[in-house]
Amino acid sequence: MSSSPFFEIDGMNVYYDRVRAIDDVSITVDRGEIVSVIGPNGAGKTTMLNAISGVLDYDGTVRFNGNELSDLSEREIVEYGVIHCSEDRDLFPFFTVHENLLMGAHLQGEAETRQRLEYVYDLFPRLNERREQEANTMSGGEQQMLAIGRALMSDPELLMLDEPTQGLAPIIIDDISDAMEELRSEGLSILLAEQNSSFAMRHAERLYLLETGTIELSGTADEFKNNEYVRDAYIGVT
């Protein structure tokens, strides 16, 4: 008998007024797996992650590590270890890199915070070099590294990344890619919402295609790469 998935969305529906933005979406992520949801801008990827995080109400079920998340607050979901790095980054613009990272460690003790800081600075050496620099003076790519680093300060069990490559130069995408591979090697479970399908297929074991709020296709990275529709519509989209 197979065990339940580490993370599972079952029959999620999200409405804006009477418009259904997410339509009966079901997704699973196993422990230590990177799963990506790809699709065009406006497909519903951000809406889905906001619902998981407790920002939006939804119908359906979300389970994490055997626990039902549907009725929990945003803080309680974070305490369970589900951490959302949002598309907007939501940095404190006049805080330094170091201060922004500390804001991500509000549930950690002093010793754990020191360990997580060392971990994040090792993962993103550029942040270490700029630890006293205010976030608003950094490039978009550096801000994205900081947003991911702050999310990692909470020591997540499931990290949800929303469009981490959006608007970034190729050299910065390479840095984010290297970090993704490091996180993969450590066995961190990641749910990646990404319009850049090439980036997503490079890192995810499995993918879902979300269009107009509906899952239209699911499969392995190789299956997506060999799918004619995906190749024609999405390969090379940045």
Image: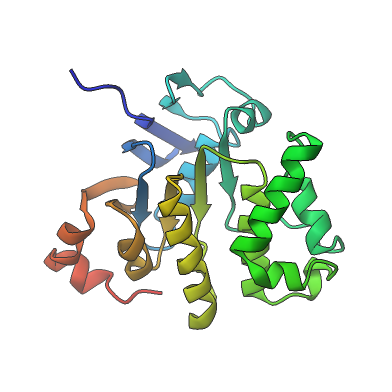
| Residue 10 vertical placement versus 96 (above, below) | above
**In the image, what residue occupies the spot 38% across and 36% down?**
31
Q: Which image quadrant for residue 147? A: bottom right
**In the image, what residue occupies the spot 52% across and 72% down?**
175
Q: x, y (%) of residue 183?
A: 48, 53
| Residue 222 vertical placement versus 116 (above, below) | below
Indicate how the structure is coloured in the image.
Answer: rainbow
Q: Quadrant of the C terminus?
A: bottom left
Q: Which image quadrant for residue 136? A: bottom right
Number of numbered discs present? Answer: 0
Q: x, y (%) of residue 21?
A: 42, 43
- Left or right relative to 36: residue 78: right
Q: Is residue 43 visible in the rendered structure shown here?
A: yes
- Residues 149 and 73: in front is 149
| Residue 181 vertical placement versus 46 (above, below) | below
Q: x, y (%) of residue 179?
A: 51, 63
**In the image, what residue occupies the spot 51% across and 37% down?**
157
Q: x, y (%) of residue 22?
A: 39, 41
**In the image, what residue occupies the spot 18% across and 60% down?**
222
Q: Quadrant of the N terminus?
A: top left
- Left or right relative to 117: residue 61: left
Q: Is residue 169 visible in the rendered structure shown here?
A: no
